[in-house]
Amino acid sequence: MPGYIAAIDQGTTSTRFIVFDSAGRTAACAQKEHRQIYPQPGWVEHDAEEIWQRTEEVIAEAMEQAGLKAADLAAVGITNQRETTLLWNRKTGKPLGNAIVWQDMRVAADVARLASEIGDDFFRRRTGLPLSTYFSALKLRWLLENISGARRQAEAGEIMFGNVDAFLLWKLTGGGVHATDVTNASRTQLMNLKTLEWDAELLRAFGIPRQVLPEIRSSSEIYGQVAQGPLKGVAVAGILGDQQAALVGQTCFRSGEAKNTYGTGCFLLMNTGERPVESKHGLLTTVAYKLGDQPARYALEGSVAIGGALVQWLRNNLGMIKTSAEIEELAQSVNDNGGVYMVPAFSGLYAPYWKENARGVVAGLTRFANKGHVARAVLEATAFQTREVVEAMEKDSHISLASLRVDGGMVANDLLMQFQADILNREVVRPVIQETTALGAAYAAGLAVRFFSGLEELRANWAVDRIWKPHVAEKEREQLYKQWKKAVTRSFDWMES
């Protein structure tokens, strides 16, 4: 009997393949970055062929590292950067061009036009999502309009659309399966949140031909088998968008349980049960997961576009640090932020503001400020944005969070986690198993093939690694937050429509 379960974790900056044992412990892991392509300001692209190549490489590396064969794996799951949009040829599997990444801003004019012509409520009522450059539908429309012959090919059924999960599933199964799960479908702005099906009115509004779309399936079922390579014959049995995967990996299966993932962006999700909760405070309503034939569970989500990406910007664009890990030491070289605040509205502002025309600002600079203060402001920006999302979520859900479960690459930064606890005035809890995104996809796959007995077994795997408690006085906390809010307003309306 197979003793392991695995997951492909295809993220915004890298691809990982992780093998887990039945207790959720990591048995093998391989990771490789891919290029970030910036053709012009506000545009962000990925080479889908490169992503597939990296996927093949990390699978081979991890399997060799652990000395495993395909027969040792019960199943494999997929988790992925959401909303990133691509088209590929049905016969060859070759992408028609670069994928448009979720952060990309090129469809901002279409957002304004549709908001004027149809109105944001039309889209939010059906999808739980506001009109935004963030989601897939307008990106897909742009590809159909701007790649020569794409619309004709789409209407003839010659090309296929997918977010990265659908593309990887297609490639893994040798072109056998064109499908996505409900969590990824819910981020396209083309799926009806209540019926969990593609919505004809939305397709008309965005001008999307039905023929190009994948089949919508649950998050935990056998979609097909891997056609070739080290995983040949292994069932692909779980798909979850990365943030929903982290919710599952953190075992937030009860209503009111929430997690915050600190990755390229920063994403707070709260399980709201079997009914979608409409947000009145700038959050998204989305599908949390659907396990096989069980009813779908929904979530409220606060999406912050720039979290860890701000650290990468400091490293790659300004050269202030050589590795991302160095930011903690640099930030610790000063006692506080020195009055410096950084609002990373590189892609506009997401939750709770949804301002497409905002742009990044650095506020409060004096001659006293040095690179240590800037580094500290970079880290604090993520914590401040998280507090804004937490406040909105508590208003929408009428649930007060006693503590915040955290995961993602940035949770290794003790300075950030302590400041997060301080500015939230509540405990921040890091689990022992911190690869929660990949773990959630592995859990979904494992449930589908009965590698795991059920949710209680998964809950038993979850354990606390460290807890940060708030130490800042109330007056200092609120003064810091007040100055942050003032800095945020300086980023508004930078771009004129």
Image (cartoon, helix red, strand yellow):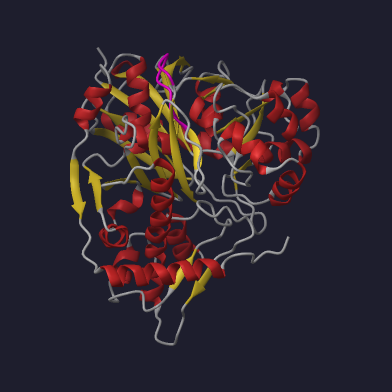
> Quick check: 383 above or below 429?
below
The quadrant in which the N terminus is found is top left
> Magenta includes 88?
no
Q: Residue at point 19% right, 38% down? A: 463
**What residue span does the magenta drawing correspond to?**
287-295
Relative vertical location of residue 81 with respect to residue 232 in this rendering, above or below = below
Q: In this view, does 364 lie to the left or right of 421?
A: right
- Residue 275 image point, x, y percent: 45, 27
Q: Quadrant of the C terminus?
A: bottom right
Residue 291 placement: quadrant: top left
Residue 207 point in image, percent of width and height: 75, 32
Q: Nearer the viewer, residue 460 or 40?
A: 460
Residue 188 lies, with reference to residue 196, above or below; the image says below
Q: Closest to the observer: 138 or 52?
A: 138
Q: For this view, does 305 lie left or right of residue 112? A: left
Label tally: 0
- At x 60%, y 56%, the residue is 355
Residue occupying image coordinates x 31% and y 37%: 257
User: Residue 472: horizontal and vertical position, in percent?
Assistant: 24, 67
Q: Is residue 17 visible?
A: no
304 vs 245: above or below: below
Task: Say if the magenta span includes residue 290.
Answer: yes
Image position, residue 41 (x, y; %) = 65, 59
The quarter holding residue 220 reads top left
Residue 234 visible? The answer is yes
- Considering every residue shown, the one lying at the far bottom of the view is 367
Majority SS type along the magenta span: loop
